[in-house]
Amino acid sequence: MKNLFYIILFIVPLIFYSCSKEEPMTPEDSQIVYVCTSYSATTYHTDRNCPRLKKCSADIFEVTRRKARENGRIICSDCRKRDENKAPDTVK
């Protein structure tokens, strides 16, 4: 019984501490992205005019990229490619 008490005393706070850690914010996390609220939608979009987002028959919400990721959304492949093409070429 005493051992169980010590296990609970040390393990439970450790679990709560590890679960409460938040990743530090990055500039991209605060970027506004677009989310289709359809039940089957699983992506977020960086471009409001994305052809895939235009197919959404439900409401479209503006949220931060961080919030979209926290809700299990991944970036749309079209938007990702478009964003990669916008990035400046650092290799010469």
Image (cartoon, grey):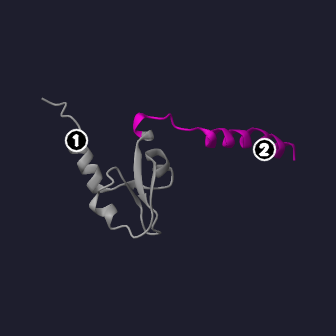
State left or right for residue 17 relative to residue 56: right
Q: Residues within 10 Å of mark 1 (few under 14, many from 20)?
A: few
**Hey, what amino acid is under mark 1?**
Lys
Q: Give whichever of discs 2 and 1 has the lower sequence position.
A: 2
Secondary structure type for disc 2: helix
Residue mark closest to the camera, 2 vs 1: 1
Q: Please tell me in which quadrant of the rendered image residue 60 appears.
A: bottom left
- Measured from the top left, where is residue 88 in percent x and y? 21, 34
On residue 8, the disc is: 2
Residue 6 falls inside the magenta stretch: yes
| Residue drawn at the location 19% of the way across and 30% of the way down | 90
42 is higher (above) or lower (below) than 12: below
Residue 77 position in % (x across, y down): 29, 56
As drawn, the residue found furthest toward the left would be: 92
Q: Are marks 2 and 1 in contact (CB under 8 Å)?
A: no
Write the start and end of the magenta stretch as one range. 1-28
Q: Which mark is residue 13?
A: none
**Principal SS element in the magenta part?**
helix
How many angstroms separate mark 2 from mark 1 (CA)? 52 Å
Mark number, residue 86? 1
What secondary structure is found at the residue carrying circle 1? helix
Identify which residue is drawn at 29% across, 52% down: 79
